[in-house]
Amino acid sequence: MINLQDIFSALTDFDVTPPDVRVSSVVIDSRQAGENSLFIALPGENVNGHQFVQSAFDNGACLAFIDQDVPECLHVVDLRDGHFDPESLSLPLPMCLRVENTLSALQKLAQFWREKHPLRVIGITGSVGKTSTKELTAQVLAQKYTVLKNPGNRNNEIGLPLTLLELEPQHECAVLEMGFYVPGEIQTLCEIAQPQVGVVTNIGTVHAERAGSQEMIAKGKSELVQSLPPAPEGIAVLNIDDPWVRWMMDKTHASVLTYGIDQQADLSASGIESHGLDGISCNLTYQGEQRWITSPLLGKFSVYTILRATAVALTEGLDWETIQSALSTARVDLRMHQLTLPNGITIIDDTYNASPASTTAALDLLKELSGRRVAILGDMLELGSYERVGHQKVGHAAASSTDILILVGERSKTIAETALENGFSQKCLHWFPDSTQAAQTAAQILQEDDIVLIKGSNSMRMDRILDAIKERA
């Protein structure tokens, strides 16, 4: 449990002994503040956390980080150089701690707290598959270790520090997803988390609009393997099938463990079989030993998730029997999952986000299934100069994998054009400008026993279509 002394040690050089104040949790949302919590007032684009300091105190917070004047804060301890008054430590709780920058203070505190815990940290980055890899890796490692992981999408400069501040003495491993928008971002996350193991999934075009190009994305992601300690402590787990990830082999001082379909990989997969909605199976080969793996994960593309989790498990000392058992019973909270409605319609719900690679992979899964196959696809965003070619790839895949194609958004017109050029029937194609207009029509088109894939970028709100289908079932 973090205390006020930890905060002083992390943020200042003051030679003082502050009161024994223990923090139960660290939050950035005043509504989540509880008894003895620390509230971080972050100024955002739309909402300024400094407006909710009193609300956090009302909900039980005992401390708040601020970097702006907050009139309702009667008790302020100024931790900035040249401003600190030792007498202010006698102020009653709740109190505000004035810092130069609240985000920086959060990150410094998280780094300090991580350094107090001698554990293994596994960092995971890449364009597609980060979350599924994090979830499966954490579940496999949990067969031997007590594991901390970042929940949901807490993978950025705010979410990752908040996760690390949940570390407790019993934790032996932390599995941390690391997001990326611009170069330098992952380096910052690594300075905070100090990973010994770095996993890179692949390099796609998602976020190219912000990063600039696929090359810039690769350079940004490579910051993870460059930040690892030298071998043998540091281990880079790299996808040999992706040329941009393979390029990273020479960018690290850590040991390199490669994985992939390429049989030259240190850990390779062969004999991959998809069993539709019942999962997949494959042979994994490592150091001359071959193991048959079964898993409930969906689609042949999930073999990469299995490879990554297995690679990390092997580096962390798990035996094959434990790994096989964990993979065969995996029930991880993946973003793609299936549900069967009362009218017999099966939904493959992948509404969280979309990229060309993940969408074509989902269409490959749909193609394997029996029944009338319906794909409901929305725009893929943040692709920058790769936008048109990315949507064309999806259109090409959709033409051969679907019977009914429902498209949402202006960019998806490119999917429609490409699908038609590849022989898809015009009468089986429907386009709508947004998910609200598509929702009711989509629900009416569906028939009993249809297999329906729903996927699109998060801001396209494809979940509205899913809700409409559920209501009509």
Image (cartoon, helix red, strand yellow):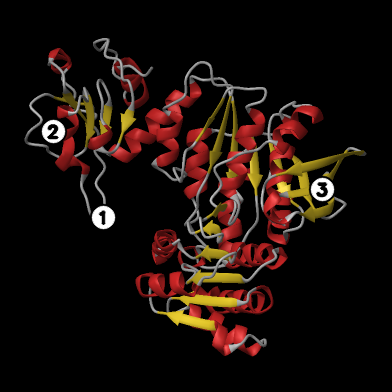
Residue behind mark 2: 54
Report the Cα–Cα distance between label 1 and label 2. 20 Å
Foreground: 413 or 287? Answer: 413
Q: Considering the image in quadrants, where does the C terminus appear?
A: bottom left
Q: Is residue 11 left or right of residue 448?
A: left
Question: Which of the 4 image quadrants contains residue 49?
Answer: top left
Q: Is residue 113 left or right of residue 204?
A: left
For the point 71% across and 48% down, the residue is 238
Q: Identify the amino acid type marked 2.
A: Gln
> Disc 3 on helix, strand or loop?
strand
Q: Tell which tag, 1 or 3, sits nearer the viewer.
A: 3
For the point 25% across and 20% down, the residue is 36
**Residue 452 screen position, x and y as percent:** 56, 65
For the point 47% across and 35% down, the residue is 192
Q: Identify the amino acid type marked 3.
A: Cys
**Residue 421 screen position, x and y as percent:** 63, 89
Q: Where residue 45 is drawn, which disc sits there?
A: 1
Q: Identify the amino acid type marked 1.
A: Glu
Q: Where residue 282 is drawn, which disc sits there?
A: 3
Report the Cα–Cα distance between label 1 and label 3. 47 Å
